[in-house]
Image (tube, rainbow, N blue to C red):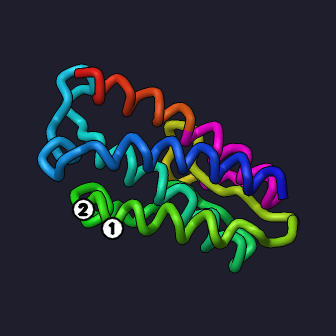
Amino acid sequence: MQLQHAVNNAFIQLAGSLEYLTADQYNLPCRNLTNSTIGQHVRHIIEMFQCLEIGYESGTVNYEKRKRDQQIETNKDFALGLLHEIYSGLNKADKPLILEGVYNDDSSQIMQFATNYFREIVYNLEHTIHHMALIRVGLTE
């Protein structure tokens, strides 16, 4: 699948950047990223794809229900392993999904929208590229 290949290319670039970082650099708060760490941005990328994986099985994707796993944001090698695991699992067939979330000030009102698996991979790829740009700012700092 071409889409899987595009995600793999982004993950290869991301992993290549992370390979040069020490554990301390991966966990260092970056002033230009409002004191977030590169590890926190990597965690965010990974957990969005994990939400999609869970949503594929259940039929409903909710990105707000991320785990926020500290190990991903503090352990670079663990995160790199998860990037490979995510890529390996992207070869599923397209299917309809429901995207749910809270998109207004009333947190009790959950909205739902029709989507599909391939569309959500595209969203996650765009989201990954956005966070990779932020990670680059952190790397430059």
* Residue 7 percent across, percent down from the top left: 66, 50
Element type at mark 1: helix
Q: Is residue 43 above or below residue 31?
A: below
**Image quarter of the C terminus:** top left
Q: Mark 2 and 1 residues: CB-CB less than 8 Å, in contact? A: yes
In the rendered image, which residue does mark 2 sit on? 75
**Which residues, given as a range, are shown in magenta?**
110-128
Element type at mark 2: loop
Amino acid at circle 2: Asn
Quick check: is 106 in the magenta stretch? no
Q: Is residue 71 above or below residue 135?
A: below
**Image quarter of the N terminus:** bottom right
Q: Write down the quadrant of residue 30 in the picture.
A: top left
In the rendered image, which residue does mark 1 sit on? 78
User: How many neighbours does mark 1 have within 10 angstroms: few (below 14), some (14-19), or many (20 or more)?
Assistant: few
Q: Is residue 1 above or below residue 45?
A: below
Amino acid at circle 1: Phe
Horizontal relation, residue 34 to residue 95: left or right? left
> Residue 126 shows which numbered tag?
none
What residue is at 24 percent from the left and 40 percent from the top? 37
* Residue 98 percent across, percent down from the top left: 76, 61
Looking at this view, is 53 or 9 the one in front?
9
* Residue 120 percent across, percent down from the top left: 72, 52
